[in-house]
Structures are given as C-alpha cells and as structure tokens.
Amino acid sequence: MTTPTSQRPPGRKPRQLSGRPGLYTSYAQHLRLLNTRPKLVAVGAIVLLALAMPWLVQDRTLSLLALACAASIGAIGLNIVTGYAGQVSLGHAFFLAIGAYTAAALSGDPDGRTIGFGVTNVLVWLLAAGLVAAVFGVLVAPLATRLRGLYLAIVTLGLVFIGEHVFKEWRDLTGGAGVGRPGPVPELFGVTLNKSGDVLTSDQKLYLLMLVCLVVLGILARNLARSKVGRAFAAIRDRDIAASVIGVNLARYKMIAFAVSSFYAGCAGALLYTITGFIEPTSFNLLLSVQYIAMVLIGGVATISGSIMGAFFITLLPALTRELPTVAPFISSDASAPLNVFQVETVLYGLLIIGFLIFEPRGLYGIWTRIRNYWKAWPFSY
Amino acid sequence: MKELLSSTLAGLGQGSVYALLALGFVIIYKSMRVISFAQPALMLAGAVLVSYLVGPFGFIIAVILGVVGIALLGLGLERTVIRPMVGKPVFVVAIITLGIDIALRVVINGFIGTDVRQVGDPWGFSRVSLLGVTVQERYIAMFLTTAVVITVLFAFFKYTRLGLATRAASYDQETALAQGISVSTVFAMAWAIAGGLAAIAGTFVATGVGVDQQLWIIALKALPAIILGGLDSLGGAVVGGLTIGVVESLIATYQSDFAPWLGDNFSVVSPYVVMLLVLLVKPYGLFGTKEVERV
C-alpha cells in the first residue's frame, strides 16, 4: 500500500479554500485525522475543556467522568472488532476481566491475601494488562476465522460463562465470589495516584490519567481505522468473501481485529478497576458485555467519537436515573421497592438498544451528523 | 453402575428441557435466520405465569394456559418489535432480541420478588425406582412430556399445510412468497411456537426447585445444544439438548472424584466447554447445513 501522500501530483500543494471546509483538493487531505478546520478547532476545544475539568467540577462528578473515560477505551475496543471488522463479540466482559486481573496481580501487595507482585508502575501494568488480554484475543481468533455471524456470537457468549467460572474458582487470584480482591495500585514516577496529595486529590489525578489514556488510545484507534488495516476490516465486514478475493488475508486480519480489540478491553478493565479500587469476580457477566454492546450501538457503529459518546451516555445514565425519584415520585430509590431506579436503569439499557436500532441505527453519532448537516445548510433546508 | 444409570436418566430429563428450548431457538432461526436471545425471558415468563395460575386452576390447566399466554407474548413481541426490522442485518435483529430479553426480565422479576415461587407440580423431589435404578419422578415427567411435544411438533411440520409452508419459507423466502405462502404468518407462528416451548421448559425447570430470578441462565444452555446439533436442524436440537443434559449430569456426578481441580460447580459451565470443543472439530455442528460460499 502506498502512502496517500505519494498519490498527490508533484508541485501542487493542497490548499483549503476559505468558506469551503468540505472541499478537498487531495486524497491525503481527505484522509487526514482532523481533515477540516472546524473539526480541528472543536476537538482542540473539547480536549482543553476536558483537561480543565478537574478544576471546574466536584470530585464526585470527576470520578464518574473518569469511569466514563475508561469505559470509552473499552467501547472503542469493541467497536474495532464489531463495528469496523464486523465480528460480533459478546465476550467483551471476559477480556475486560483478563486486563483487570493482570493489572491487579502485577501491582498487588506481595504479602496480601491474593496473588501480587508489587509492580505498581502504571505504564508497566497497563501495557501488561493490554498484552495479556491481546494474547487471549489471538487465541479466540481462530474460532472467528472458522465461524461466521451468530455462531461467533454464541461462542463468545460461552467464553463469558467459562471465564466467570474460572474467576470464581481461582481464589488465589480473584479472592472468590462475594469476596473479591483490591484493584490495581496506580503509581507513576513516584506519585501514588489513588491517594490525595498536596497539589491534586486522588480523583483529580485518576481522572487525568484516564483522560490521557483515552486521548492516546483514541488517536491510535482512529489512525488504525484510516490505515490499510482499517480498510481491510471494513472490507471483511461488508463482505468477507469479496474481501478475500481482492487479497485480504481473512485469518490474519480477523486475528489483528481480535488482538487489538482485546488489547483495548484489557487496558479498559485495568483502568476501570483502578477507579473502583475493588474487583468482584461475578461482575464480569453477560450484562457487562451487553452494556458495551449498548455503548457501541447507542454511540454509533464504526466511529471512534461515537464509541466515546456511547460510553459517556451509558456510564452517566445511572447518575441520571438516580435523580428520577425527585421528578417522578412513583419510582422509588429503594432497591426492594416494586418499581425502583435500578429496574428502570436495566430496562432502559434494553429499550435504548431497541429504540436506537429501530429509529437511529447510526446512533448518537448519526444524530450529531444530522444536526451538523442542518446547520451547514441553514437557513436553506432541502 | 447404578450411579451411572441414575445420573444418565437425570441427565436425559434435564436434557429434554434443553431440547425444548433448543427447538424454540431453531424454529425461529429456520424461519428468520435470527437467533432470538429473548428465549430466556420467555422461559422465565412461562414459569412465573404458571406459578400464578396454578393456585386457581390446578397444575395441568395452568401449564396449558401458561403455554397459550407465552405463545401470545411471543406473537406480540414479533408483531411490535421484530416485524419493523425484517430485512435488516441479522446481527441487528439478534441484538434487538437481547434488548427485549433484558427489558422483559426486569418486568418479570418484579412479579417474582425476592422469594422463590413454586409452580405447584405434583412431583416435587419424590423418587421412584425403575428397574432397580432410583430416579426423580420429575425427570421422567420431563422426558415423557418432551417426547410427546416433539412428536406432535414434527408431525405438524411434516403433515400439515402450515408446516409445509414453514418448511418452504425456511428454504427460500422469496420463492415461498411467490407461491402464495404468507411468510408473515410463518414468522408469527415461529415466535408463538418458540414461546410455547419456552413456557413448557420453564415450568419443568422450576419443578421441585421453584422459580427465582436466576432461573433464566438455564435457558442459555440451550445455545450450546443448538450449536452442537447445528443451528438449522430440528433433530440436531433434540440430540444436542439431550447430549448436553447427559454430559452435564455425568460431570456433576463424577467430576469431584476425577478432576476436583476444575472447581466446584464445573458442571454448570461444562455445556459451553463441550460447545467449544465440538466447534473446533465441526464448525457447523453435528447436523447443521454447511454454508456454501458462492462468489
């Protein structure tokens, strides 16, 4: 594959015409990461705002945002394998668990109740969590090359159940069902991130860690999607036989898709349980996988920004439903009451998935493009 | 030897429940090419409905009413949620059924509450001696009921006009439409039958142990069964269901003696392990149609 820049005729510099942000004069420009000026400005503004958040909102909100950032990484991972490469995976919870336990075991207390090696450096355990999960992804990939569509969905569903059993029984690592173990210990350049220091509180530090991880991994995923690999994924998704006819090595690219997706899931798992600080083996169940499916579908299939929107939406949803009793007094916040917020929350997952698939299959990202296109043409509507 | 036999018989009983659920999955798959992940919710709904009806009507009538009720529920779901999605990618429809399952189960859990509800079956845990082998009565009831239901179902598909229409539609929808077959009736009927089968299965799963909020997980064990038999094979679903039931029961009996390192309750996940092993050897199951790739 030649690099896009070499396809530009020599001597002609691509230029941006003023007032025509959608007009591209070269292929390289079209493929660029931030291909229009408004996009560049908007993304820059969002990142700056996100960086300023620790000093703008309360710590409680901040830890919720940190969770959403970590979940975004996991959602991006699922979107790579399901959205871009079209391989339906219901086994995301399994890979999240692998990452979480790898990180927790590496950084755990060597003298503790559960396995621990005392390597608390974030960079080390984060990378290890991703890599170990990726290895498991590669192990699953041969199944994906033999199976298609719903067969694969069921197999990955089986993976969640087998994983849940192993995690429940391997008490040295996980502490066992109902007991659990402490999450990963984050430490970077001598600073322990989950303890409040003189300058920043623990929530502020964790949030910044998650944000940096999300930005780095998000850009990497976006880059992957516009590269040769990303185009191969799309070809496999749209018609795998046609893809193999034009020279895409199915086994190889399905393996890459699963490896990358699991890497992201592993990182997300490690980071998520750094924030919560506690891992319970039964939490890696089918519902967790479904939550990630919901993030991808609600956010927008095969878009990175959509995955992030979906993850924020699903993570912040409980915070919204907890407020419901104040506006709708017939809904109780007591878990034992007949109609309570926890039930409303779970029903909403289901209904939102159904609603988005029927009425807005492109998800939040699709809604955003419609709003954008409306204002692009405003005041002239077609 | 006696232990082996009684364990196998119990497995056949439990397996016949999986076979009923698996048939529901396969019937929907054959008509729409979609796996309905809503089956667990329908099964739970069936068990709960029977547990409410058993008081005023008695067990037999309650089961019949429960089957009709859940068949109508399946029909309603198909009409309202699945019908608008005809022609969309199967993955999308499958995920929608997953959404239905989650939403529906919350509603049903509201009817279960925190207690265990009883379906009021006449068997309970009482045992009977059969040729010197002790086996729980409910397993025999499960096996016999399933045998009758399956015979009726297979006869329906083979000898009735509607059964013929179903087979034609599952073979080729467009050609079936061109012959004047109402494919939408076939879809509706598939969901109704799957709902009815799920209700019977749910009732039998709940015999003895009762209905609680975790019962739905059992329905997912029909998935290894249909993979084992092949997604589009009715006979395969029955064989797969029975096999999974027997394997699970044997592992439950002998695993603690032979392989204690696999952990407690390994039998619960053993169907999934069997499924993975089978798929590595035969990607389309034992009786499934191999997909022909045309370029």
Image (cartoon, helix red, strand yellow):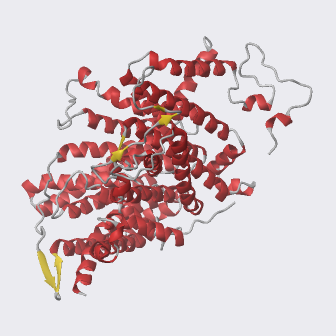
Percent position of residue B100, x then y: 36, 45
Is B106 located above or below residue A252 in the figure?
A: above
The quarter holding residue A28 reads top right
Q: What is the total number of numbered labels drawn onto the structure image?
A: 0
Q: Residue at x 34, y 47 (%)?
A: A181
Instruction: Choose between B241 and A216: the one closer to the eye.
Output: A216
Instruction: Choose between B227 and B25: the one closer to the eye.
Output: B227
Is B112 located above or below residue A196 in the figure?
A: below
The quarter holding residue B229 reads bottom left
Percent position of residue A138, x then y: 57, 57
Is B182 located above or below residue A230 in the figure?
A: below
Instruction: Choose between A182 and A148: the one closer to the eye.
Output: A182
- In what quadrant of the picture does the C terminus of chain B appear? bottom right
Is A354 located above or below residue B164 in the figure?
A: above
Q: Residue at x 59, y 47 (%)?
A: A260
Percent position of residue A228, x then y: 72, 44
Instruction: Choose between B54 and B101: the one closer to the eye.
Output: B101
Percent position of residue B65, x then y: 18, 56
Q: Residue furthest left?
A: B56
- Asked if residue A360 shows in the view, the reply is no
Q: Residue furthest right?
A: A11
Q: Residue at x 40, y 64 (%)?
A: B272
Side (left or right) of A319 relative to B128:
right
- Asked if residue B2 shows in the view, the reply is yes
- In what quadrant of the picture does the N terminus of chain B appear? bottom left
